[in-house]
Image (tube, rainbow, N blue to C red):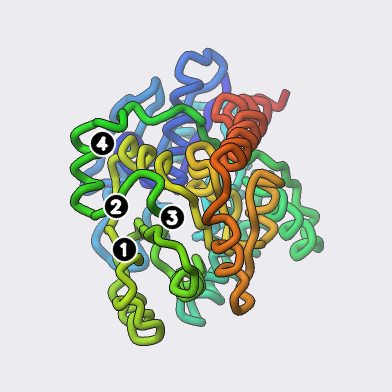
Amino acid sequence: MQHIFIVGSKGIPGAYGGYETFVDRLTEYHQNNSKIIYHVACKSTENGEMEYHNARCFKVKVPNIGAAQAIYYDVVALNRCCNHIKKNHIEHPIVYILACRIGPFAGHFQKAIHKLGGKLYVNPDGHEWKRAKWKAPIRKYWKISELMMVKHADLLICDSKNIEKYIQHDYAQYYPKTTFIAYGSDIRLSIMGDNNEKYVQWMKEKGISSKGYYLAVGRFVPENNFETMIREFMRVRSKRDFVIIATDNNVFLGELVKKLHFRSDQRIKFVGSVYDQELLKKIRENAYGYIHGHEVGGTNPSLLEALGSTELNLLFDVGFNQEVAEDAAFYWNKNDGNLAALLNKVDQMPGEKRKQLGTKAKKRIAEAYRWEYIVSEYEKVFLDL
């Protein structure tokens, strides 16, 4: 029996995010696997335990201490893992940490886990230290933390081939042991029909129509290139809207309003967040095209979801996005007029051509990113097959 302890996600069930969805799917597909038992840390306002997908979910009470919450949560969760392993005499456990937040503590926990006969695995995520939202000292911490996590990990599971190359190149002095397992997705259609009341009402409220909009979904932060996307869209001749589903960031929004004066363009529509996943899937399906500006990180969940739902995908030209979509999408860069020219080119694309691209995109997801395949790859690594 292989015990796997997972630390770093907000927990399951209920929380939505990349790591949370990953842990949910991993435990779902392995819930009847007699060779694996999962123990999942869950961020909470109270301590306790529950069972979900046959996994032991242990709640970690985290005080409201601002930005330090994430580090506190990981450290306390890891201590809880070590105590449970020791108390229950668990042999050869694997502790899998998602993200590189606790580098300064990595050496300590590797020693503790080794002493218990276990191994420490790490998912390095993307280039967190590159994100513009962090001030310089915090970016420096992220970089140092990443270095220390790489140094003390027994195995790094990278969800992007480009991240794996980066780890091998930048931290070659530590001879890191790495493997590549992508993030997963699915290609099923939304359970909502075109006449679903909730969907119809949402479209009516936002003033948009099926195939009458381009779509962008993601955190509203500078490194997702919303400035370039909005500026370039304002230049195109299209009568379609540009619908932006994003998290709130009033400071960044104010900066873009001042810089771009996009409020005068009625086609650009910020519609808030959509947490109903079936509704979001339906909105993706009926978009004329999807514009993806993410340039930091590994395999991006919103890109996989777009490729599985939207026929026409226009992606920022960076290695992370190229390795996922390959030739099933078009690519753009930050050069003046580049995205605008691409949008003008595809705006009148024949339906048959869009359909072909959509089929190719779904095939790409089915062959390399479907959850069943991703989870089976994790089984091989966890059981060392």
Q: Which mark is residue 347?
A: none
Three-letter residue code for mark 1: Lys
Dots 1 and 3: beta carbons under 8 Å? no
Using the image as rendered, state which of residue 239 and residue 182 is in the foreground: 239
Q: Is mark 1 on a helix, strand or loop?
A: strand
Could you say which is closer to the camera, residue 23 or residue 122?
A: 23
Whole-Å distance between the Cαs marked 2 and 4?
Answer: 45 Å
Looking at the image, tell me whether mark 1 or mark 3 is earlier in sequence order.
3
Asked whether disc 1 touches disc 2, contact meaning CB atoms under 8 Å apart, the reply is: yes
Q: Which of marks 2 and 4 is nearer the N terminus?
A: 4
**Type of residue at label 2?**
Ile
Which one is earlier in the sequence, the residue at label 3 or at label 4? 4
Mark 4, residue position: 48
Residue labelled with disc 2? 208
Using the image as rendered, state which of residue 284 and residue 273 is in the foreground.
284
Q: Nearer the viewer, mark 3 or mark 4?
A: 3
**Mark identifier at residue 214:** 3
Closer to the chain start, of discs 1 and 2, is 2
Direction from residue 277 to residue 150 in the image, left or right: right
Q: Name the amino acid, label 3.
A: Tyr
Distance in Å between CA atoms under marks 1 and 2? 9 Å
Q: How far apart are marks 1 and 4 (CA)?
A: 43 Å
User: Residue 39, position in %: x, y?
Assistant: 43, 32
For residue 193, above or below residue 236: above
At label 4, the amino acid type is Gly
Q: What is the spatial separation of the Cα atoms under label 3 and label 2, in whole angstroms?
A: 10 Å
| Residue 259, quarter of the rendered image | bottom left
How many marks do you count on the picture?
4
Secondary structure type for disc 3: strand
For disc 3, the neighbor class at 10 Å (few under 14, some 14 to 19, many from 20) is many
